[in-house]
């Protein structure tokens, strides 16, 4: 038989990450954005940030509620500024929508602190199946993003997607979870050092500019009219343009479909040139994408849990890196 219930703890404890109710969120933004009385809101997914779907009348919107401590208001403003630049030049990207006073960013008070909030147009359609036709369309859209952002002169700032961002920070996060696996840690630091050396050797020849930062199938939709739209620029910023090709190569290699990669590059080159030195460097950025993904998981264990970096998960990521090394090492190792 259970004993008497314990008294509640006497103090309110700090919250690292709260999940805002869709109903509460809808009430908070209904008036600022002029949403209809019958508007609905549902949580689509939790990730680095929380994403909600708003349906107001016949129109769908996306709300991103940025996590406190992950993106500063300055970084969010840079992202929205970049999207506004692209949208006004008719590039097919999800556009930030201002409130009734013309503001693109709202601040929502959460238990863990203020969280930035932005409303976006909904990208119609579904994820790409990466047929050759779809791959070519996706390549052409990336070319438009790179071409049009060449004239982007931001007022706000964001850290560069440089080697500190792509190598040093992920390694620092992952290292905490490989202390009991010294051989794997030695492999990871060794391959990371060689990737760093490979990028450094050609860095001066690589094109640098505004990048999407996460250009893959989950962030591109194809609509019924055969048009593609890119969204989720959360990881955008100045960086090596070859990095924006990495997730497509990752997908093509994983599916053993070189025609997908070739069609993507063809679509890009029909709109904008890309030098061979940049394409030759893409395998390096494919490996950096793997390292970055591991780093994101490791840096979020306090909110996502340690299961995402348990031994089985680490085995999977390290196997992917070893497979990558076996495929590419002869062609890139300095």
Image (spheres, rainbow, N blue to C red):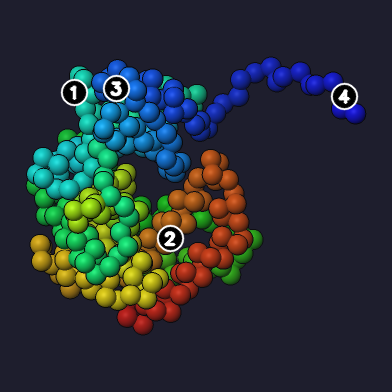
The label number, if any, that marks residue 36 in the structure image: 3
Q: Residues within 10 Å of mark 1 (few under 14, many from 20)?
A: few
Q: For numbered disc 4, what is the local secondary structure?
A: loop
Q: Is residue 92 left or right of residue 50?
A: left
Residue matched to label 2? 291
Residue matched to label 4? 3
Q: CA distance from mark 3 to mark 2?
A: 44 Å
At 60% across and 62% down in the image, what residue appears?
Answer: 312
Q: CA distance from mark 2 to mark 4?
A: 50 Å
Residue matched to label 1? 102
At 40% across and 71% down in the image, what residue appears?
Answer: 254
Q: Residues within 10 Å of mark 2 (few under 14, many from 20)?
A: many
Q: Residues within 10 Å of mark 3 (few under 14, many from 20)?
A: few
Q: CA distance from mark 3 to mark 4?
A: 51 Å
Quarter-of-image position of residue 123: top left
Q: Residue furthest right?
A: 1
Foreground of the two, 52 or 253 = 52
Where is residue 161? Give x, y as percent: 30, 52
Q: Disc 3 vs disc 4: which is toward the camera? A: 3
Contact check, label 3 and label 2, Cβ < 8 Å? no
Q: Disc 2 vs disc 4: which is toward the camera? A: 4
The label number, if any, that marks residue 274 in the structure image: none
Quadrant where the C terminus is found in the figure: bottom left
At 34% across and 23% down in the image, what residue appears?
Answer: 38
Q: CA distance from mark 2 to mark 1?
A: 39 Å
Where is residue 307? Give x, y as percent: 60, 52
């Amino acid at each position: 038989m259970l004993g008497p219930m314990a008294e509640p703890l006497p103090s309110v404890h700090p919250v690292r990450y709260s999940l805002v109710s869709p109903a509460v969120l809808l009430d908070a933004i209904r008036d600022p954005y002029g949403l209809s009385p019958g508007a609905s809101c549902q949580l689509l997914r939790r990730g680095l940030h929380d994403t909600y779907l708003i349906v107001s009348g016949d129109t769908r919107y996306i709300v991103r509620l940025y996590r406190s401590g992950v993106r500063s208001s300055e970084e969010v403003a840079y992202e929205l500024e970049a999207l506004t630049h692209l949208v006004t030049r008719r590039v097919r990207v999800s556009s930030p929508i201002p409130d009734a006073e013309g503001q693109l960013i709202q601040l929502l008070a959460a238990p863990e602190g203020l969280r930035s909030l932005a409303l976006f147009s909904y990208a119609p359609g579904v994820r790409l199946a990466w047929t050759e036709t779809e791959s070519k369309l996706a390549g052409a859209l990336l070319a438009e993003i790179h071409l049009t952002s060449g004239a982007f002169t931001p007022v706000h700032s964001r850290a560069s997607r440089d080697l500190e961002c792509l190598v040093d920070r992920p390694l620092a996060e992952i290292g905490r979870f490989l202390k009991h696996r010294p051989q794997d840690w030695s492999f990871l630091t060794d391959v990371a050092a060689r990737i760093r050396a490979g990028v450094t050797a050609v860095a001066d020849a690589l094109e640098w500019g505004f990048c999407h930062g996460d250009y893959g199938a989950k962030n591109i939709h194809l609509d019924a009219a055969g048009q593609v739209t890119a969204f989720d620029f959360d990881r955008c910023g100045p960086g090596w343009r070859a990095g924006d090709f990495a997730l497509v190569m990752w997908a093509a290699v994983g599916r053993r479909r070189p025609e997908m990669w070739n069609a993507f590059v063809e679509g890009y080159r029909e709109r904008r040139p890309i030098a061979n030195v940049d394409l030759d460097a893409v395998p390096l950025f494919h490996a950096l994408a793997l390292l970055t993904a591991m780093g994101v998981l490791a840096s979020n264990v306090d909110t996502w849990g340690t299961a995402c970096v348990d031994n089985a998960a680490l085995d999977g990521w390290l196997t992917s890196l070893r497979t990558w090394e076996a495929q590419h090492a002869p062609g890139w190792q300095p």
